[in-house]
Amino acid sequence: MSVKWEKQEGNNGLLTVEVAAEEVSKGLDQAFKKVVKQINVPGFRKGKMPRQMFEKMYGVESLFQDALDVILPHAYGHAIEDAGIDPVDQPEIDIVTMEKGQPLVFTAKVVVKPEVTLGDYKGLEVTKLDETVTDEEIEEQLKSQQTRLAELVVKEDAIVEGDTAVIDFEGFVDDVAFEGGAGTDYPLEIGSNSFIPGFEEQLVGVKTGESKDVEVTFPEEYHAAELAGKQAVFKVTVKEVKGKELPELNDELAKEIDAEVEGIDALRAKLKEVTAEEKKQLAAQTLRDNLVEAAAANATIDIPEAMIASETDRMLQEFGQRLEQQGMNLDLYYQFSGQDEAALRAQMQEDANSRVRVSLTLEAIAEKEGLASTEEDVNAELEKMAAQFNMSAEDIKKALGGTSVLENDIRFQKTVEFLVDNAKIS
């Protein structure tokens, strides 16, 4: 087999491949064995029709497509390996010549992985997030826990932010009640932002037994298309108002919040320790993210649309999987959000572009700096995962379909750590 690679404009190129006549004959033989099983010919059992008779009746050309299905994947795979190229999309294949007893010649228009021209990636200046834990932060966390355990108590005063109002309501557009716009004995926490923007704020100051017309405008992206952007009036009656009665912040409450602590001082100490670790991890991750983004921004890359489309496909699949974990699916999401797949893909494109740029930049840095995963690195990661999932390292490897994904992840981790080690951090 002979292979010729011609680099063209951008990330495009043309691969010209000549497959030996012997390989073409083998492909035609396999195609005949497949096709002949599907033909009924009087005087012959199914699948026993002689090859010569078949070609006389149907012509050898009738075998070409099935033969190509056999020959092309193997030939194309060897061709890109021989040419040393890395395609990022399906090729556009054109058959130049194909005859019985002659070599097969085909061309493939190929989009390849782009070249990366690295900019500055060593000595990048970044600021690390402050890891200091303040007393105010701890008290805010305690206040949040205290609020979570508060009891709702009926009150006679007017509604204020944070109260829960039990309401009857009915919505009208152009003085006509609309479907799904009414409710009775509905408990609404004022400030929860669970209703249409502007609704809850207008109930502040209203007392039990009072009614009010609440005027709102539905968001343009509202899930019910017939209401999107429309002005509406909700006739609301407040039937009951409940305020939050906070429990006293003492040792007893501390034990209710966390059964492992002895009292409020111990809870404060534990919260400070946990918060410090969370801030440390956040600061480290933010630092790595900022360095990677800076290195990627400094690189010059002509990213093919095919790579962005593939990454968008991957992101869409990941999003669908997350929805399924929440008991939803993409079809339901499109219904509720008022979006369709095209709109969601368009929304994801910028992030997809960024992901591809980062991946290509890290790959180029790893190549330039000779960073790679070792057998010890891979084995250590397999053991770590085995312990995490209570499986053997060998079973983990089988589940992953080999170690190539791990090797790539480890290489990227080493590259990010290289950026951190060579950064100017303030």
Image: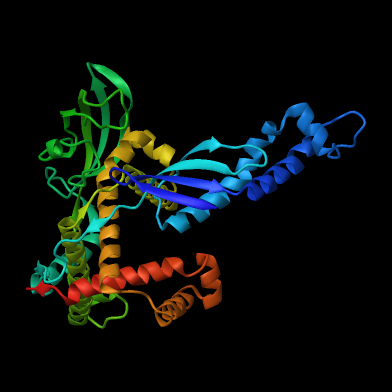
Whether residue 47 can be seen here? yes
Residue 398 occupies which quadrant of the picture?
Answer: bottom right
Above or below for 312 versus 269 = above
Q: Is residue 227 left or right of residue 99?
A: left
Q: Is residue 201 left or right of residue 362?
A: left
- Placement of the C terminus among the 4 image quadrants: bottom left
Q: Residue furthest left?
A: 426
Closest to the observer: 296 or 4? 4
Rendered residue at 24%/54% (across/down): 152
Colouring chosen for the image of the structure: rainbow
x and y, in percent, of residue 241 in the image: 20, 44
Whether residue 256 can be seen here? no
x and y, in percent, of residue 218 in the image: 22, 29
Residue 176 occupies which quadrant of the picture?
Answer: top left
Rendered residue at 55%/75% (across/down): 394
x and y, in percent, of residue 106 in the image: 51, 41
Above or below for 210 versus 17 = above
Above or below for 248 versus 60 = below
x and y, in percent, of residue 305 in the image: 31, 42
Closest to the observer: 56 or 340? 56
Q: Residue furthest front?
A: 102
